Amino acid sequence: MNTDDPELALLRAQDRVLRIQTKLHRWARQEPHRRFDDLFNLVTDPAFLLVAWARVRGNRGARTAGVDGATAPLIEAVRGTENYLGEVRTSLKDRSFRPLPVRERMIPKTGGKKRRLGIATITDRVVQVSMKLVLEPIFEADFLPCSYGFRPGHRTHDAVAEVRMLSSRSYEWVVEGDITACFDEISHPALMDRVRKRIGDRRVLGLVKAFLKADIFGEDRRLRASQFGTPQGSILSPLLSNVALSVLDEFVARHPGGPLSKPWRRCERRAKGLPNCRLVRYADDWCLLVAGTRTDAEHLREQAATVLSGMGLRLSPEKTLITHIDEGLDFLGWRIQRHRKPGTDRYYVYTYPSKKALRSITAKVKTVCRETGVNQPLDVLLDRLTPALLGWSAYFRWGVSSSTFSYLHHYTWHRVWHWIRKKHRKSAWMSLLRRYGDEGGWPTTESHRLFDPATMGTKRYRYRGSKIPSPWPTAGMRETAPA
């Protein structure tokens, strides 16, 4: 595709990609058992490669190089977009393309542990995005409504809202699933078997397998073979992990008391003392909600472990808990628990920020205040704190978070004023307050005002269910609603 007019060429490419994706999604919805052939020509289509390049170039990681040392700006400046994409297309067409090793980086986690992050080369990222543009509409037709992670238009809030809704309607026992090193242990043969159910093009299957088997260049500068798992940080990894974990979605959906059973059948089961169940999954974080007894939840946990073992995955015995909703659970940063409403004798399920989430933002505030030298202007500190506070508060505004926001307000106030007093050790408190505080004493300068979490309004997030829009509208077909 000629890129002399980059903006016009990109708009035309995006329009073509969307039209083809819509067709693929519609065909996949209409024919659940269809295997798609001749997809390789779409992966190498100039429009798909141009859209893929635009996404890679516009990503924050565009300046991060893989093992070849090339960044997106460097490629653009030295080789030019049109020539570069032509070379990528040619290498795919003549089958000379081979994924290069993934550069490994260990990212610290809370608790002292680390997780692996794989950094692919820019070329590998472009090819992966092009493949995702082709494969995602097909697999999205198969994913069940209980899956929310890394799906277009789906949010963490949707998953939390469904847990709250179900636990308010007799699903009181919750299996909090924790898969041991999920992304690192997925079985490649089992995953490829699931991919082959929908994809019949051997060239595309070969590319998927090649990316799964790409070597890993570790921080110790040693090359290791990839035998299991999908590297975190890979663009295809979220989609492939959803394909793998959909075995759990399908198991729960087909359960006699699952969402595909008739309402009268579920009522009959409860009358006989048999359990019903629902699954809410966000990537590898999932909750299995059970309307029954603790024993029923334990049996379902064992069955889920058996299903996941077929994909090479294991549940962590220590972290996979069975909890009653009255005791509460932590899910995606939220605390979900049933309480008595103050002033009444009625009980409701509430969602509010978990203690772990609150510790993370207070630790961030503390760290920023420590790392920002007192020789810097106050504006520098406020510039660093405001995005963190605003982002955290915006995420947790969709719950019962007012008291948490108030606590964060006071914590931040004390930390920032402690920093100011260290900066001006000889100045009197009242003079500092007049210089750096507004009428309420909140840290402010002439050009900046620190974001105040207490000013963030809260609102109940509406459970969207079947109203989550698809990016590929299918005329005359309705999305399946969760039961």
Image: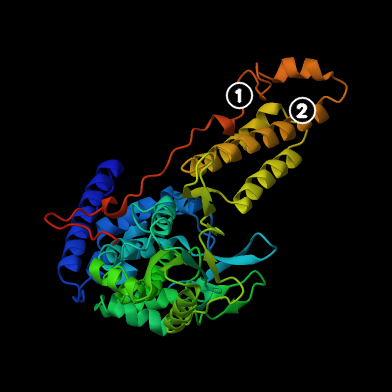
Looking at the rendered image, the quarter that the N terminus falls into is bottom left
In the displayed structure, 431 sits above or below 60; it is above
Q: Residue 25: image x %, image y %?
A: 21, 62
- Residue reaching furthest right? 426
The local crowd at label 2, few if under 14, some if 14 to 19, many if 20 or more residues have their Cα within 10 Å, is: many
The kind of residue on which mark 2 rests is Ile
Q: Is residue 274 above or below residue 398?
A: below
| Residue position for label 2 | 420
Secondary structure state at the residue bearing disc 2: helix
Label 1 belongs to which residue? 448
Q: Position of residue 166 (x, y in %)?
A: 39, 58
Q: Name the foreground residue: 413 vs 89.
A: 413
- Above or below: residue 334 compared with residue 382: below
Colouring of the image: rainbow
Query: Of marks 2 and 1, which one's residue comes earlier in the chain?
Result: 2
Is residue 256 something that shows in the picture?
yes
Amino acid type at mark 1: His
Q: Secondary structure at mark 1?
A: loop
Q: Is residue 436 left or right of residue 322?
A: right
